Amino acid sequence: MTEPTVSPAPARSSILVVNGPNLNLLGTREPEKYGTATLGDIERLCAGAADAHGLECDFVQSNYEGALVDAIHEARQKSLGIVINAAAYTHTSVAIRDAISAVELPAVEVHITNVHAREPFRHHSYLSDVCRAVIAGAGPLGYRFAIDYLAELTRDRNV
């Protein structure tokens, strides 16, 4: 009798970049707060940052909480880590918080604006305590900083 062959686990060489509600409107939505970079510009920035580390990025943007939770769950099998700008869901979603916690991947919370200099309700995040780092107020560069951080953090695991 021959031993069954076990396929090795697929190499994880990607980072999931999650964007929440209304971020599809970047570039035209309140440019005085969010700047003129579009979501496509941010995706290109992320892809370039990941490529510099020999990684790839998978992107998801949704205005629907459940779609974001599903994407985070799927990352468990194929991603090294998660960059998440949950937008308004940062301040309201226990479901997204629980998804990040459940997948046990390092995550970085990103905000284009400095949420602590804005309305008081934006000062609380349901995600911060389950993320390895929080980057706020660096504009689109915050995404690049998050990818650089995750690449360094997971350097020995992306084989």
Image (cartoon, rainbow, N blue to C red):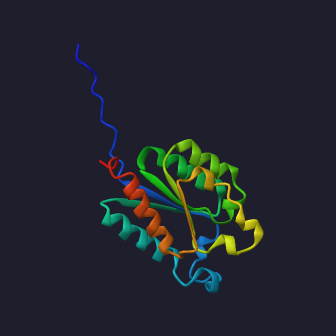
**Residue 61 pos. (x, y %):** 55, 64
**Residue 10 pos. (x, y %):** 33, 43
**Residue 76 pos. (x, y %):** 48, 45
Q: Residue at image x 68%, y 70%?
A: 116
Viewer-side residue, 98 vs 5: 98
Residue 114 in which image quadrant: bottom right
Look at the picture and state if 31 lies above or below 92.
below
Viewer-side residue, 60 vs 156: 156
In this rendering, the count of numbered labels is: 0
What quarter of the picture does the N terminus occupy? top left
Q: Is residue 44 left or right of residue 28?
A: left
Q: Residue at image x 49%, y 50%?
A: 106
Q: Is residue 149 left or right of residue 31?
A: left
**Residue 102 pos. (x, y %):** 57, 42
Looking at the image, the residue that sits furthest to the left is 2
Q: Residue at image x 40%, y 53%?
A: 153
Looking at the image, the residue that sits furthest to the top is 1
Q: Is residue 68 left or right of residue 152?
A: right
Q: Is residue 118 left or right of residue 53?
A: right
Look at the picture and state if 61 lies above or below 71.
below
Q: Residue at image x 41%, y 48%?
A: 78
Look at the picture and state if 119 lies above or below 84.
below
Looking at the image, the residue that sits furthest to the right is 120
